[in-house]
Image (tube, rainbow, N blue to C red):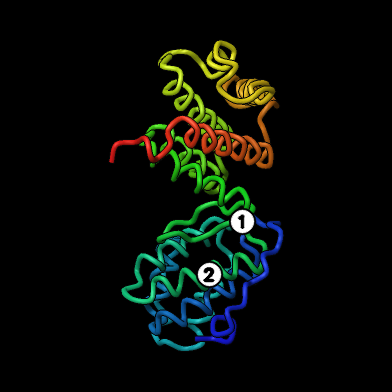
Amino acid sequence: MNFTDRMGIDIPELQITIRNDAPLPLRNYLFQLMQKYEKSLKKIRSYVCFVTKEAEDPNNWGENDFMKAEIQTLIQNCPWYRIYDLIEYFYSKLLVNKADFEKEINEYFIEKGIGWKLTKGLIETRGEEALEKKIAEAAVELGNAKLLTSQNEIHEALKDMSKRPNPDITGSVQHSLAALECLCREITGDKKSTLGKLINDNPDIVPKPLNDVISKVYGFASEQGRHLREGGEPNYEEAELVVHLSASLCTYLAKKNFPIEKLEI
């Protein structure tokens, strides 16, 4: 166990500045990390060639500096999203120490402001800490209330934001509002109306003027996410905001209308 772990030091989390990129320092670090967890250069080369869709150099048959240079060149020159594919693929090939590898790569992401995380072998988007916690809390509350459709929509929103090489921004907006819409349908018993109509017909579903907030979020999502106009797509930060608001509202409404003590066990 290293000093940081022994002393229980919290790693400072840099502001996320890197998402659709894999800078050279990350590529070099990944190669070092792979060598730590896999001693065979031939296996590492086969993994890298498979992910980058390149052929192995038949002239490099010895596990030496020439093979290292070949691997390094492949890693340094491949498209950015292949680096994250390689992280997932390497994880899948590990027979032991998967958790340790995941921990080390995630620490690097945190320290270097990279907006991704490795979760049980899959690269997912890593938002600011508040968003991460809010999505997790919403998923738990919706699960407790057995609102599995809404819970799935929240997960799908996060999954769309995690897509490579380009996140599905409109998809994340649609899914996050669908989670809220499904929840409001369960609360009101109206199984067909849209979220906008549900709020208009049931303004007391949340304390005023939060009903106006939901209506405006729905209006934004309808304009930017559901009925796209040319050039009207939301950006990543706007999608994060909608997902965060939707998750917060889902958490509140699930707790208010489906408290755990009233649910059948």
Q: Residue 149 carries which label?
A: none
Residue ID at (50%, 42%): 138
| Residue carrying label 1 | 115
Disc nearer the start of the sequence (1/2)? 2
**Taking 229 as reference, is 166 left or right?**
left
Task: Choose between 158 and 63: the one closer to the eye.
Answer: 158
Q: Residue 64: percent from the left, percent from the top?
A: 46, 88
Residue ID at (58%, 87%): 3
- Which image quadrant for residue 72? bottom right
Task: Choose between 194 and 221: the one closer to the eye.
Answer: 194
Q: Residue 121: percent from the left, percent from the top?
A: 41, 61
Q: What residue type is labelled 1?
A: Gly
Can you say whether 31 is above or below 194 in the image?
A: below
| Residue carrying label 2 | 105
Q: Residue 156: percent from the left, percent from the top?
A: 46, 39
Q: Which amino acid does label 2 sit on?
A: Ile
Q: Is mark 1 on a helix, strand or loop?
A: loop
Q: How far apart are marks 1 and 2 (CA)?
A: 12 Å
Q: Where does the C terminus fall, quadrant-wise?
A: top left
Can you say whether 58 is above or below 6 in the image?
A: above
Asked if one can make out residue 228 in the rendered structure from this viewpoint, the answer is: no
Q: Residue 128: percent from the left, percent from the top?
A: 64, 53
Q: Is mark 2 on a helix, strand or loop?
A: helix
- Whether residues under marks 1 and 2 lie with C-beta atoms below 8 angstroms apart, the answer is no
Task: Choose between 55 and 39: the one closer to the eye.
Answer: 39
Can you say whether 119 is above or below 179 in the image?
A: below
Residue ID at (41%, 71%): 99
Residue ID at (71%, 57%): 17
